């Protein structure tokens, strides 16, 4: 619940501030301690710049610490939408 509150109340806004588009957030039914989310960037180079700006954001360290979540394992996957995807 703390991680979800952190994203809901703070992280999504910080993402938006750094040109990261919030696409969607999910919790798998069989692994409730997991959060899966998709954010979109203009391109891969922009993603690198956006993530660096996110890490450098002065609000982020306080938000991360105040959530009480501690270290989390993050897996990043870059994807390209197919020509028939409704989200292009």
Image (cartoon, grey):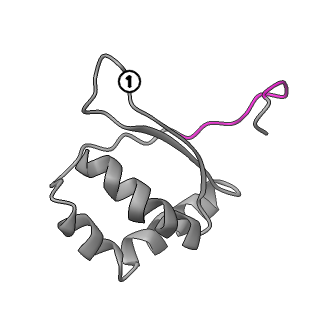
Q: Up-down: is 78 above or below 28?
A: below
Could you tell me residue 26's position as x and y percent? 46, 33
Q: Is residue 66 left or right of residue 19?
A: left
Q: Residue at position x 62%, y 67% from top?
A: 19
User: Mark 1: which secondary structure?
Assistant: loop
Read off the magenta span.
78-85
Q: In which quarter of the image is the N terminus?
A: top left
Q: Does residue 71 belong to the magenta stretch?
A: no
The image quarter containing residue 42 is bottom right
The residue positioned farthest toward the right in the image shown: 83
- Residue 6 at x, y percent in the picture: 33, 58
Which residue, given by chain and number where applicable, does mark 1 sit on?
28
Magenta: main secondary structure: loop
At x 24% / y 33%, what residue is drawn? 33
Above or below, 2 relative to 28 = below
Q: Which residue lies furthest to the top in this view?
A: 30
Q: In which quarter of the image is residue 17?
A: bottom right
Q: Nearer the viewer, residue 35 or 4?
A: 4
């Amino acid at each position: 619940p703390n991680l979800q509150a952190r994203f809901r109340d703070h992280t999504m806004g910080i993402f938006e501030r750094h040109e990261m588009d919030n696409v969607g957030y999910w919790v798998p039914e069989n692994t409730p301690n997991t959060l899966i989310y998709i954010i979109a960037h203009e391109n891969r180079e922009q993603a690198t710049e956006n993530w660096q700006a996110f890490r450098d954001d002065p609000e982020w360290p306080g938000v991360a610490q105040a959530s009480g979540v501690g270290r989390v394992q993050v897996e990043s996957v870059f994807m390209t939408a197919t020509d028939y995807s409704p989200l292009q």
